[in-house]
Every structure is written in structure tokens, then in C-alpha cells.
Amino acid sequence: MDLINPTVVDLSRFQFALTALYHFMFVPLTLGLTFMLAAMETVYVVTGRKVYKDMAQFWGKLFGINFAIGVATGITMEFEFGTNWSMYSRFFGDMFGTPLAIEGLMAFFMESTFVGLMFFGWDRLSKPAHLAITYLVALGSNLSALWILVANASMNVPEGAHFDPDTMRMQFDSFVSVVFNPDAQSKFVHTSVAGYVSAALFVMGISAFYILRGQHKEFAARSFRMAALFGIISTVAVITLGDVLGRMDYEKQPTKIAAIEGLWHTSKPPYEPWILAALPDDAKQENHFEIGVPFVLTPLITHEFNTPITGLHELQDAAGPRIRSGIEAVSALRRYGETHQQSDLDIFHAHEGDMGFGFLATRHAPNQDVTAIPATALDQVVEETKPDILPNVFVTFWAFRLMVFLALYFFALFAISAYLSLKNKLERNKLLLRLCMWSIPLPILATEFGWITAEAGRQPWTVFNKLPTFMSASTHSTSYMLFSLAGFTVLYSIFIAAELYLMFKFARLGPEEHGSAHGNAEPAYLHATQPAPAAE
């Protein structure tokens, strides 16, 4: 078997990471703003106060800009699976493609249809009907995230399918198992709530800008207060649900959780510290220094006090028998493909669970053919393959910590902001208002770090324990990959420039320019001199 040029694999990974992380800059804001718009409009329908309608319309305009560019950047990713990851698509297309197809048919079309009604139906629909449309937009955007995360979860915890040695594909078995994959449910809720944090700080930061400039005082004060309260609830939820997701990784992906914690050796409960900072060295497989809090790691991960957490060295050693078994599986599969002998099929089924580890060993086999490994070289191939099961510990460790540290910062910022807002003391705290403005991009950055943790921690697999990443890419030339990478970089740079230009433009214009019946005239409530009441 001829392996794909490692440079092509690396460029394919870099290109997909670039497009995925760029696209995900828009997703959290879309997920969160839809429910904030629904909340604002709900208050408008219940109270009849026009300020809440103007809030929903103005923040809806910024949502529309973000939604449009997010859609444009997301479409290209689906084509990349076929162009740059053809082996993965062939091997796992049934499992991955089914949720994506449902996402397009059910969620994306639903969301896109109702977005138009939400924007243009204010004067054509009754208040309850328009409110229902807004909630359907929110439901559609979150259903879209659900199906995409179901597809992603099947890569991390492949359930509901079996490998067919005749077609060399993972065959879809159970729709229920795929949809109710525990990893999918945990990841969906955690990711969606992270979007609510992003939206809350986005609204709060722009409102802080208006308060600092003395513009749109009542509009800004009410938007700020609603965003701060929304942010507190969302941050608590995202931290709690992150713990659930961590527990899932502990059970299903032990190499990821050990890399996240920088744990090279099995822990010694209950003393084992949770490491706040360290310098993991992947080459030497050790941490050069550690700053930690003792007695925290074991209960944090296992929810018990005396359960050890397996370290990376021990996980690597435990992979040895699985690599040997996987080599047997791949060898039998190769022979079965040539002879179709039942005896070879029986051997394959006996070792089928370790097939992925056999694929992983092909890089170290003579001529990349595990069937050609002589008995005298088997131990050497196994030893050379064992380190390959580990992800990049430095990247995974620090991506996770940056995400966690930012989440704690958001909680403090939202809590202080909500308190001062309820006490009508915002205008006196200019430093806090500036901090809110400067912090607008940070939740997006935190979600990016979360995805880096999830995806870097899954390596070296595209399908965990089933298909290695280096076998998943297409057989392109290096020049082709460099050309397409340059093209995507230019195109996406244009997208980000358009996004920033439009966001800054309409945020600076403010709500008074938002298509009112009186042209550019400001509504009377925007000239209110009294601070907004503490609660509505």
C-alpha cells in the first residue's frame, strides 16, 4: 500500500483547520444571537414597549450580517471532504454524510426560510406570528448545530456502524445509536451554550460602546443588562457542561484526557494536582515544569477520590498488544481481499476491534505493507508505532487551559457587569465598559481553543481507533495543495474584511438608523435622561 505524501497530508490538515476555525468564528454568534433576539422580542410582545422591538431589530441586523457570511464560509467545508479527504469519505461517508444531509434538509432550509420572514415580516405578520418565526429561526440554527455535532461525534465515538470487509467501508447500522451518541449530546449542549456566551458579550460590548459615548442610553442600558444576565446563566452552563464532556472523554478517549491534563504517568490519587501551567515536551514525553493545585485532578476528572487516571506512558504501553492484534487484522483483511477464504475472514473478525492500530503500523512496516513484516522485525514495528497513538500534548494542554481561563474570566465579567447594571452604576465604571468592549472577540477565541482541544486531542485518528489521519487524505500533489490553500486564504481574508467592515459600520450607526418610519429621527426613548430602572 502506497501511503500519501506526508506533506500533502499536513497541508490538507492545515487547510481544513483554517476553513473550519474560520467558519466557526461565525457559528457561536449565530447560535447565541437567535435566542437573544427571541428573548428581546418576547419582552416586546408581552409588554408592548417599543424599545424592545428596536432592540430585536437592531441586533437582528448584525445577526443577519454574521449569518450570511457564516453560510458562505461553511459551504466550502462540505466540498473539502470529497476533494481533500477522499479516503475518509469512502471509508466513513455513510456515517458522516447522513447527519449532514439531514442538517441541510431539515435545519438549514428551515433556518434560511424563516430568516427571510423574520427580517421582512415585521409589518406583515401579527406580533405572535412574528415571535413564532423568530423562535423557529433560533430552533433551526441550533438544530443545524445538532446534526453537525452528531456527525462529528461519530468520528470521536464511532457507534451505530460496523466495518464491512467486502466493501472496505463503515456500514450504517443504527440511526438511533448515531443520534443519541453520548458524545454528540454532550458536545451539542456545550457548544450551543458557548455560542450564547459569545452573543452575550457581543451585545454587552457594543452596548458599552454606546454608554461610553453617551448615545442611545435607554436602548444600550437595557441591552447591556439583558446580555449580562444572559451571560451569567450561559457561562455557568458552559462550565458545568464542559465537565460532562470531560467525563465523556475520560471514558471514551483516555489519550485525549491525559493530553489535556499533561499527565505522562498514571495519577496517584487523591494527591494528584490539577496542573495550571506546564511546558509539555512531546519529544521527551515529560513536563519541564508544573504549577498545580493538589487534590483537585482526581475528583475533577473521575468524580471520585481514589480512582487513578491512566497516564500517557501507560496508555502507550497498553497499545502494544492492540498494535500486534491490529497487524493480524489488517494482514487477514489483505489476504481475504485477494482469496476470499473464510479462514482469513474468521481471523479478521477475531482481531477486528484493533484494525485501526494495524493501519497505524503501516507507516513503519516494510514498503508500508504489514503483511510483509518478518517475525524478527515485528517487535521493532510495534515499538515504533506505540508513540503514534498519542496526540500533540503541548497543543492540547494549552488550548484547553486557555479556554478554561477565558471561561472563568467571562463569569467574573458578566457577574460584575450585571451587578453594576442592576444598581444603575454603569456610567461611573468606564474601565469596566472599556473592558467589555475589548472582550468582544474573546468568546470566539475561547470556542476556537475548544475545537482545537477536541480535534487535536483526537489525533492521530480521523475516526477514533478506526482510521488514521495519514490514510484519510486524497492523493493530491503538493503544488495543488499550496495553490488551493493560497486561494482559500485570499477568499477568506476578503470575507473577514467584509464582516468587520459591515459590523463596524452598522454598530457605529446605531439603532437610530435602523429603518424606522421616521427616517433618521431618533425615537423619544433614546433621549431619556433618567437611568433605566433596575428591573423590568
Image (spheres, rainbow, N blue to C red):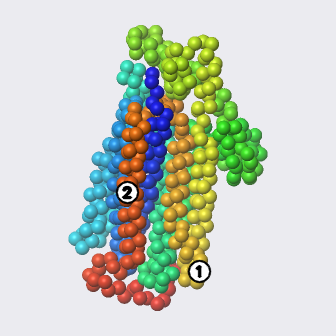
Q: Which of marks 2 and 1 is in front?
A: 2
Q: Is residue 480 above or below residue 451?
A: above
210 on left or right of 299: left
Q: Tell me which amino acid carries mark 2.
A: Gly
Between residue 147 and residue 384, name the one nearer to us.
384
Q: In this view, does 441 lie above or below 169?
A: below
N-term mark: 2 or 1 = 2
Q: Residues within 10 Å of mark 1 (few under 14, many from 20)?
A: few
Between residue 367 and residue 404, name the one nearer to us.
367
Q: Can residue 444 be seen?
A: yes
Where residue 353 appears, as percent x and y from the top left, is: 52, 24
Q: Mark 2 points at which residue?
A: 70
Residue under the image location 62 percent in, 28 percent down: 386
Q: Quadrant of the N terminus?
A: top left
Between residue 448 and residue 373, name the one nearer to us.
373
Q: Mark 1 points at which residue?
A: 429
Where residue 53 appears, as percent x and y from the top left, is: 35, 75
Residue under the image location 47 percent in, 75 percent down: 207
Residue 403 lies in quadrant: bottom right
Where residue 529 appears, as percent x and y from the top left, is: 46, 90
Task: Please say if the residues under marks 2 and 1 sit with CB atoms less than 8 Å apart.
Answer: no
Between residue 83 and residue 107, name the one nearer to us.
83
Q: Residues within 10 Å of mark 2 (few under 14, many from 20)?
A: many
User: Quick one: which residue is furthest to the bottom in this view?
Assistant: 529
User: Quick one: which residue is furthest to the left in this view?
Assistant: 124
Q: Distance between the residues labelled 2 and 1?
A: 34 Å
Where residue 254 appears, as percent x and y from the top left, is: 61, 37
Q: Is residue 315 above or below residue 22?
A: above
Q: Tell me which amino acid carries mark 1.
A: Asn
